[in-house]
Structure formats: C-alpha cells, structure tokens
Amino acid sequence: MRVRLGMVGGGQGAFIGAIHRIAARMDGQFDLVAGALSSDPKRARASAADLGIRSYADFAEMAQAEAARPDGIEAVAIVTPNHLHAAPAIAFLNAGIHVICDKPLAATPAEAEAIAAAAASSSARFFLTHNYCALPMVREARARVADGALGQLRLVQAEYLQGWLSEPAPGNKQAEWRTDPARAGAGALGDIGTHAWQLAVFVTGQTPDRISADLSSMVPGRPIDDDARVALRYASGAKGGLWASQVAVGQENGLSLRLFGTKGALEWRLSDSERLIFTPKDGPAQILTRAQDRSASYRTPPGHPEGYLEGFANLYSDVARIIRGDDSLADRVPGLGDGLSGMAFIAAAKASATRDGAWVEVGA
C-alpha cells in the first residue's frame, strides 16, 4: 500500500521539489496527494492544479487539515530554502505526520534544536535527504570499512567542488537565496559542505571531535562564505580534511571521498559514481562496480548507468518501508542525528573561522 505524501515548497519553477517528486514516484511506494507548494497563494493553486493534488495556502493549515482527514497524508516532503525548514517540520511533527526534509536541517542552531524537541515528543519519524549516501557504491564503501578492509583508519579527505557561484549571479533564484545569510544560514559550508561531512561520517562510521576552519568569501561583496577549508581530527587518532567550494572554476559537481587505513584505501568520486576503487596494502588497485554492491540498491543491471535521481529514490523507498514498520534499514537512512551533526559542524566551523582557525570541539 502506498504512502500518502504531501509537499511543502516545490512549486512552479522550483528545482529540488521536482527531484523529490520524481524520486518518490520511481518505486511506486508514494502517492503525492496534497501540498502547500508556494508562499504565493495563486502560484500554490496553479502548481497544485498542474499536479492534480489538494492545495493549501500555507503549511500550518495543511498540517491541521490533513491530520484530521481519514485519507490525509502520512508523510510530508519539505523542499523549501533552509530558513523555512523548521516551522513546517515542527508543525507536521506535532500533527503526527512523518517528515522528509531536504538538507541541511535548518538555518540556525536554535531552529535545529526546536526541530529536535518536536521530534522527541512526536510519534512521527524525521528523515533527512542526504541523497549521495544512498548511492550503491557509497553503501558498499561503508560496508567494506565496517568489515575492516581498511584496517585502522588514518586519513580522510572529503571534497565537494563547484564553480557556478564564481561570479555574482543576479536574477538567479537559486543563487539569490543560497548567498543570503538570512535564508541560507551558511554558504558553501551549509549547501555542499554538509554533504561532504555526512558522506565521510556515513562511510567511516566516525565523527570528527575537533575541527579547524578557514572560511572565505571570494566574490567581492558576497556576505556569506563561498569557500570552506576544514581540518579534521578524530578521537581514534585519524586526521582529515574537508574542502567545499562554489568558486572552483571548471568544477561542476565534484564530490569525492578518499580514505586511507593501515590495511588499504578506498576512493569514490561522484563523476564516476558507479565505480569504487579499493587498494589493499601492497596489492594492485581493484575497481569495484555495482555487480559487487551487497546492498542491492540498484534498479538496472550493472553497466546501465544510474545516478543522482536514483539516490533520492533509494532514500524514498527505504523511508516508505520504515514508515510501514520495517526498521531494518533505519541505520542507512539519514535522520535527525545526521541533521544535528551537520548543524554542529557548521557552528564549529564558523566559531573556528572567527578565531583564526583555532581548534574547536564539534558540538561544544
């Protein structure tokens, strides 16, 4: 039986809302039935009419009305800019409706804490769509680390490089809110740095306990960071680095992760997402493909390319099973803990940067 789904945000002209809708449809486990798709009532009605779903003028009305209906939504996807995550998430959690929220968790630590408080007192679950951790070879990398293939972890290098904000972009809706501190909360650090952070934590199973950050606004007059370089230290003794930049000219979507341990190394790049390179100590590199993926997170036979949309779809498929009572997949689906970890990373990096790169404990 399909999960009845609602959506907040994602109206006409929105990018990420359409991605979530396609992903939710891919495995046939969700039916989109209602939405508060825009803060503009006229656009909200037109967007809902295009999709053939119930339309609401605002999310608060939607949460109350849908919770009261016998055929009301069971889950809601929140696909708004960062500063508009907290209020709808809290409203739907309070109504007992599961929340699927785009990353990062919120724009400020206070908003993140409010979401956590609502989740703690709700019967509903909270999920966060860090889609890259749902790609088959990322899940295989995680399994190999857990199996001890790398031995003791020594070095971690995570990067997420883009170049699309290397110049001012007036009139670009996506650029406008992402470079506005009031709406984004953090620039490259929050937009893509949290992806690199979550990917490294997900695969290694370790969270850095201290970081030292250098945040820059390379474009003159930009009031928010567009380049972040962060040194990582782990309680295990491992060391690492995270570089997130949106002014790296020529880079389109350069997400990558490299891990080095006492027994071997792993390397994965989004640009070649269906291959994972494992190099055992004193042995030749091995190129692994989806044929070796033990999580079976793919839909087409190995060699038939999959990618960005399928990662989102994997998360939606797993979320549907969890909502229906199967918790066996819960450890591989990002949730509130991942969101709070990302917010702690942002806060620590900002604190370090204001103290000229001083080492700051994550979560302190």
Image: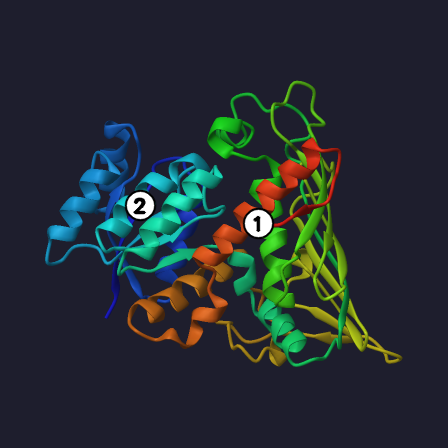
Q: Is residue 55 visible?
A: no
Residue 228 lies in what quarter of the image? Answer: top right
Considering depth in this image, is 244 or 165 the residue closer to the camera?
244
Judge left or right: residue 341 versus residue 110.
right
Please, what secondary structure does the residue beneath circle 1 have?
loop
Q: Residues within 10 Å of mark 2 (few under 14, many from 20)?
A: many
State the quadrant of the N terminus.
bottom left
What amino acid is at disc 2? Ile
Residue occupied by mark 1: 363
What amino acid is at disc 1? Gly
Looking at the picture, how far across and down is residue 348, in whole percent?
62, 43
Q: Which residue reaches farthest top?
A: 221
Considering depth in this image, is 117 or 58 the residue closer to the camera?
117
Judge left or right: residue 47 versus residue 290.
left
Q: Which residue reaches farthest right?
A: 282
Give the colour scheme shown.
Answer: rainbow
Disc 1/disc 2 C-alpha distance (Å): 22 Å
Q: Up-down: is 179 above or below 53?
A: above
What residue sits 43% from the left and 70% below the top?
330
Looking at the picture, how far across and down is residue 45, in whole percent?
22, 35
Considering depth in this image, is 140 or 189 the residue closer to the camera?
189
What residue sits 14% from the left and 46% below the top?
65
Looking at the picture, how far across and down is residue 349, in whole percent?
65, 41
Residue occupied by mark 2: 90
Can you tell which of label 1 and label 2 is closer to the viewer? Answer: 1
Please, what secondary structure does the residue beneath circle 2 have?
helix
Instruction: Give the tally of numbered discs.
Output: 2
Judge left or right: residue 67 versus residue 109.
left
Judge left or right: residue 88 versus residue 356.
left
